[in-house]
Amino acid sequence: MKLRTDHLVIGSGIAGLTYAVKMAEALPDRHISIVTKANEAESNTKYAQGGVAVVWDREKDSFNKHIADTLRAGDGHCDPMVVAMVVNEGPDRLHELMNWGAQFDIDDGGSLNLGREGGHTEYRIVHHKDITGHEIEMALLRRIDQLPNITLFDHHFAIDLITEHHFENDLPNEIGCYGAYVMDQVTGEIKVFEASTTLLATGGVGQVYGHTTNPAIATGDGVAMAYRAKARIADMEFMQFHPTALLDGAEKQSFLISEAVRGFGAFLRNKHGERFMLRYDERGELASRDIVARGIDRELKRSGEECVYLDCTHLNAAEFEAHFPNIKQKCLEHRIDPQTDWIPVVPASHYLCGGIDVDQHGRTSIHNLYACGECSRTGLHGANRLASNSLLEALVYAHRIFAWQRYQSLSEVPRSIPEWNDEGTVINSENIVVKHNVKRLQALMRDYVGIVRSHKRLALASKNLQTIYREVETLYRESRLNPELCELRNMVNVAHLIICQSSRQDENRGGFYNKDLDSSRRMKKHDTMAERKAMDCEQREELILA
Ligand code: FAD
Ligand code: SIN
């Protein structure tokens, strides 16, 4: 079946929905289709806790301070123009979100209540208790519902982008995108969505690591589709690990204990009660995420323990509950009372700083293909994202893509786009093979491509991935497709990109750390006392590991 739409959006998190609302409001005669693979609200966005980083209080805070914090966290790898642009546009985008009905916590004086998180030198995190993402997602979905020129297709899985590779023998110099092949997960039919523009807003890749704060949908589909279509993909080595996921034994998604809890005054302790982060950075628990995650990793490797602890027992109990009701509830479900017990935490994969390379209008290297949100690489985050800059980035870029597209006329879609061809394939009765390979892949990424990497581990990862890749490609060619198989194939592509780009990286920076790389070169670039202390610890760890 062929469906024709003006603008196709793949993904219904903050990025896809914000763009769709803006386009639909400004261009009522255009039609926008959103396809999303689970129910309409399921996304990383829905689970965001801490909030949106925005300079709101212009007396205490300033754009320059937020810019400086973002650049410091990004460790010399951000695009300064992009950082300034995103930070400066933040307040306008937040106003729009509030106009669409999103509500944020207010303090006694009637102003927005601003929280603080690691790497921020000021209080600037706008939040809705500890369920900010849920509030934003619901407000956007309500607005989408009111706009007649948007159709949202839930349980529709995008398999591949439509480019000339699908219907031309002689490829043009500039590859274009004309929509996507999408599986209706209820009927199993693969539909052709033809569109003048396509926006990838497919979110993160956390599931590639198994142990993650991300929900099951975060399998890197957009990055993999763009990669197969030959778009430029960058900075995949900069995977961010969140320092404090609850040690809950969860199979798919670990519950996050927001960084805002540390911003609120919680301490990280080892089992002896020591505030070990002060050994690694003078900012202690509020150092940027890469430093805290590595600090915990080192502490765990040294002690052989399975977790460290977040100590909230000294915090005002009533205020804690008012700010973090969801976190408190979840802890209680695990028989941990944050008022009296330390919360057991471990780092978990959390956020992809790299992704599909885009310019300041969200354009990828493929004509008429755009990317927004976590699947994109804009240059904002550099080597390590500053906490709560992700929702902000999605809001700003959704607006910029809209601002660019609204004055473009609709481009033609070629007539020769073929239907999906699954001739010769059979229904795969061996789903156990898919499940087994997902587990193999996740173990490989966790053990060899985690917080601390080495040349040897990366080489082993690359070699072992080849075996998985061959098995999965054979299965893909011979089987009638299902979402699990497509997700596995996508995760293998993403793992390949992370491993390759990690292997090419020749210096430790931000979230990337390879223990075999020359530390002294980096020391010259980051000659602060805190960095030097961290380097000392790293070198000691190498001796211990040796
Ligand atoms: P998502 O919200 O992940 O949406 C992706 C969408 O694409 C989903 O609807 C998904 O179903 C769909 N999709 C994916 N693949 C396909 C496919 N093949 N076909 C069809 N649909 C598909 N950031 C902050 O700034 N502040 C925070 O406080 C914060 N807290 C966080 C807490 C947690 C637990 C997590 C996991 C992340 C947090 N982040 C936070 C990061 C932030 O939530 C995400 O980066 C952001 O929400 C990503 O938005 P998105 O629209 O790009 O993607
Ligand atoms: C958190 O609340 O700790 C997550 C914030 C983020 O990922 O930006």
Image (cartoon, rainbow, N blue to C red):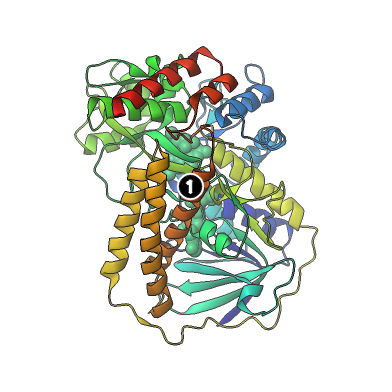
- Which amino acid does the dot numbered 1 rest on? Thr
Q: In screen coordinates, is 137 left or right of 66?
A: left
At 46% across and 83% down in the image, what residue appears?
422
Q: In screen coordinates, is 234 left or right of 288?
A: right
In the image, farthest residue toward the bottom: 424
Label count reads 1
Q: Position of residue 254 (x, y in %)?
A: 32, 43
Task: Mark 1: give few (<14), some (14-19) or many (20+) Cα within 10 Å.
Answer: many
Residue 388, visible in the rendered structure = yes
Q: In screen coordinates, is 453 left or right of 387?
A: left
Nearer to us in this view, 276 or 29 = 276
Residue holding disc 1: 45
Nearer to us in this view, 27 or 343 = 343
Is the residue 310 above or below the residue 147 in the image?
above
At 33% across and 59% down in the image, what residue appears?
438
Please state, as top left, top right, bottom left or bottom right, where the C terminus lies in the image: top left
Q: Quadrant of residue 177 in the image? A: bottom right
Q: Position of residue 265 (x, y in %)?
A: 39, 18
Is the residue indicated by label 1 positioned so its CB lies within 8 Å of ligand 1? yes
